[in-house]
Image (cartoon, rainbow, N blue to C red):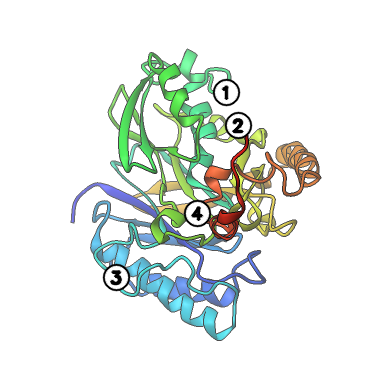
Amino acid sequence: MGDKLTLSTIKADVGGFVGHCGVHPDLLDEARQRLAESELLLDFHVTSVGDDINLIMTHRHGVEHEGVHRLAWDTFVACTGIARKLKLYGAGQDLLKDAFSGNVKGMGPGVAEMELEERESEPVIVFMADKTEPGAWNYPLFKMFADPFNTAGLVIDPKLHGGFRFEVHDLMEHKAVDFNLPEEMYDLLVFIGAPGRFAIKSIFSRETGWIGATSSTQKLNLLAGRYVGKDDPVCMVRCQSGFPAVGEALEPFALPHLVSGWMRGSHSGPLMPVSHKQAHPTRFDGPPRVIALGFQLCQGKLIGPQDFFADPSYDRARQVANEIADYLRRLGPFEPHRLGLEQMEYTTMPQVMTKLQGRFREVD
């Protein structure tokens, strides 16, 4: 057991209540009981957004620890058993393998982990989204750590002025590349502006080398080879004292930017910031939702949470999100509401193309 603290957030959809809108209380109770019985953890918080169970855990075993990942896997399996008894929709849909094999990466659940040394004060925000994909964090993470119009500290705080290193993952080719900001900002934007393929994995301070943010980058359809729903990613951001202030980390969500997901994982829609109580997407199974829970870390304990988007100052963002949703819904099956063909590979598109293959003819 090391001295550093590990913060792990692992999520999975193991059955929706009702449809894809929420998580049944019995599943959350089972998850809390499973984590409470473990001696591996310092602390934990179980929550949900939409139909996803989110396990937020602290421990001192480092990232990708087999015991911690097995605990999460066994918890999701136990919750799946209850989901099947209740005939919940999509029971166990994020568990793509039959048995645990060392850690949950590549097995379906989404994972975001960071190892850190607790500062004198250690505020952390855990962002959790439903009905969208990992690249949904690209826009807000860029705004938090690279845009001086969003984050005043990049201009006036000497601890932020040196910039940050962005680790970006190519989700198709399974490669990673680093960008040093601000000088490589334009190069970074070439890639993260295509969130369906490139996603920001982690961000590090160039001043201290400390990790400032990390996200889940698992894409379920690529892992399964078929459509199994969107990835519903999680993201953790450290705040203050060398990182964006809490208010700077929350500010990007005042604009509900467009993300991929929504109904059947096949539509673009606004990412609506909501309180935990409002995190039950129902309109066309949406619009996509994001919640933000704030914790103060204290000797490994999770003090909190603070439900940040319960703040009425985000009422305008929710109103704008609904207006955007109204406009997009009127487009029905037409792009840009429906995703482009390259992102429809795991829906009915391949079957339709195969069916009509003999009916296409050459034109002059």
Label 4: how many Cα within 10 Å (few below 14, some 14–19, many 20+): many
Query: Residue 234: percent from the left, percent from the top?
Result: 48, 49
Of badges 4 and 1, nearer the viewer stands 4
In-image side of 35 versus 23 (left or right): left
Residues under labels 3 and 1: Cα distance? Answer: 42 Å
Q: Amino acid at mark 1?
A: Asn
Residue 363 visible (yes or no): yes
Q: Residue at x 43, y 18 (%)?
A: 185
Residues under labels 4 and 3: Cα distance? Answer: 20 Å
Label 1: how many Cα within 10 Å (few below 14, some 14–19, many 20+): many
Residues under labels 2 and 4: Cα distance? Answer: 24 Å
Residues under labels 2 and 3: Cα distance? Answer: 39 Å
Q: Which residue is mark 3?
A: 100
Quarter of image, res 255: top right
Which is more toward the observer, 341 or 295? 341
Q: Earlier in the sequence, mark 4 or mark 1?
A: 1
Q: Amino acid at mark 2?
A: Glu
Residue 231, which numbered label? 4
Q: Amino acid at mark 3?
A: Phe
Q: Which residue is mark 1?
A: 150
| Label pair 2/3, CB-CB below 8 angstroms | no
Q: Residue furthest left?
A: 1
Residue 336, which numbered label? none
Quarter of the N terminus within the rendering: bottom left
Query: Is disc 4 placed on a helix, strand or loop?
Result: loop
- Vertically, is 291 above or below 98? above
Q: Earlier in the sequence, mark 1 or mark 2?
A: 1
Query: Residue 208: percent from the left, percent from the top?
Result: 28, 26
Q: Which residue is mark 2?
A: 251
Q: Residue at x 42, y 59 (%)?
A: 225
Which is more toward the observer, 363 or 286? 363
| Label pair 1/2, CB-CB below 8 angstroms | yes
